[in-house]
Image (spheres, coloured by chain):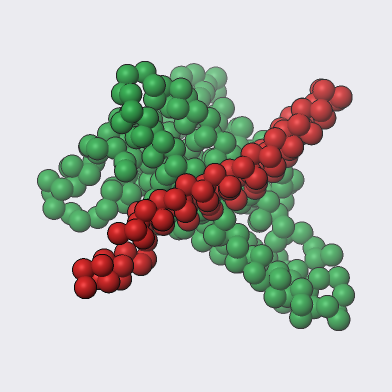
Amino acid sequence: MTHPFLILQWLEEQLHLHLGEHVVYTWFVMVVLILLSFAASRSIKEVPSGLQNFMEFVVGGLENLIEETMGSAGKPYFPLIASFALFILVSNLIALIPGFYPPTANLNTNAALALTVFAMTHIVGIKEHGIKYLKHFMGPMLVLAPLIFIIEVIGHLARPLSLSLRLFGNMYGHEIVLMIFIGLVPFLLPVPMMLMGVLVALIQTFVFTLLAMIYIAGALEEAH
Amino acid sequence: MEFFGWCVIAAGIGMGLGSFGTGIGQGLAIKSAVEGVARNPGASGKILTTMMIGLAMVESLAIYVFVVCMIILFANPFTTQVVELATK
């Protein structure tokens, strides 16, 4: 139920690599991002123009977003969160090019991203608070701690699940709807759905990065 | 083979019920956000961000239903057993 013809999957079959299309397309997105950032930072000028201007706009916007949601404490996590945002955005948007398959429409890619966020929140929490990080799971009263602890652990385990399933469901669902529309009427009917796809791609990128930021900020703050 | 017919029915009804509740929830969220912006247009940026997070949270319920429907339709764990029983 995806595109009937995928360029990179065809290429992979010609080379007999047996990787799975999401891995190949993840590599493609990585190559695109690396080349783009390399081209933008090769000749940095005082007065930016062209590609450098655009990349400065994107990176500046992300920096503002982190500053707004996490405050100045979020500065060290800028590289991680900006890479999430750029990777997810580019992988969502290549779904609109015929012959390309978004790697985020596969649960494995999203699970990798969400587990990174999950591990990062707890590493940050332990690094910031040490053993006192356990207080985050204890709730306000010591008497209720055993009860709260179980609920908190379940809540924390649900985070990577919901993060990965949300992105996966949105991208995969959009892909399926597009294919069904193309199957019904191939001429012009899928166009409004593709416009909606641009919106979904942007919103899901925004939501994923925002939730990652909120989770990391939650691990950073003091236990109440 | 009746099993697969019921699978399709279950997926359809499940998706319908899931999007029914989610639609109401999202509608309520957007209603409040629009009212907030109408009263205080200066706060629209902040309201938009909060609304987006809330909508994504509500939407994930529908997405769970969608994933379960896809599992029922395309990756049903009981397919092999049912086919075995049917061929006996």
As drawn, the chain in green is A
Depth check, front residue: A221 or A144: A144
Q: Residue at x 66, y 71 (%)?
A: A153
- Residue A223 placement: quadrant: bottom right
Depth check, front residue: B14 or A83: B14
The spot of residue A75 in percent (x, y) is 66, 47
Give left or right: position of A67 versus A43: right
As drawn, the chain in red is B
Depth check, front residue: A121 or B81: B81
- Residue A203 placement: quadrant: top right
Give left or right: position of B78 versus B27: left
Q: Residue at x 75, y 69 (%)?
A: A136
Give left or right: position of A121 versus A116: right
With respect to residue A148, does B15 lie above or below? above
The spot of residue B75 in percent (x, y) is 36, 58
The answer to whether residue A132 is seen in the rendering is no
| Image quadrant containing the C terminus of chain A | bottom right
Tally of marks: 0
Q: Residue at x 58, y 43 (%)?
A: B19
Depth check, front residue: B55 or A181: A181
The answer to whether residue B32 is seen in the rendering is yes
| Image quadrant containing the N terminus of chain A | top left
With respect to residue A26, does A121 lie above or below? below
With respect to residue A160, does B14 lie above or below? above
The spot of residue A46 in percent (x, y) is 54, 23
Q: Residue at x 51, y 54 (%)?
A: A164
The spot of residue A94 in percent (x, y) is 38, 34
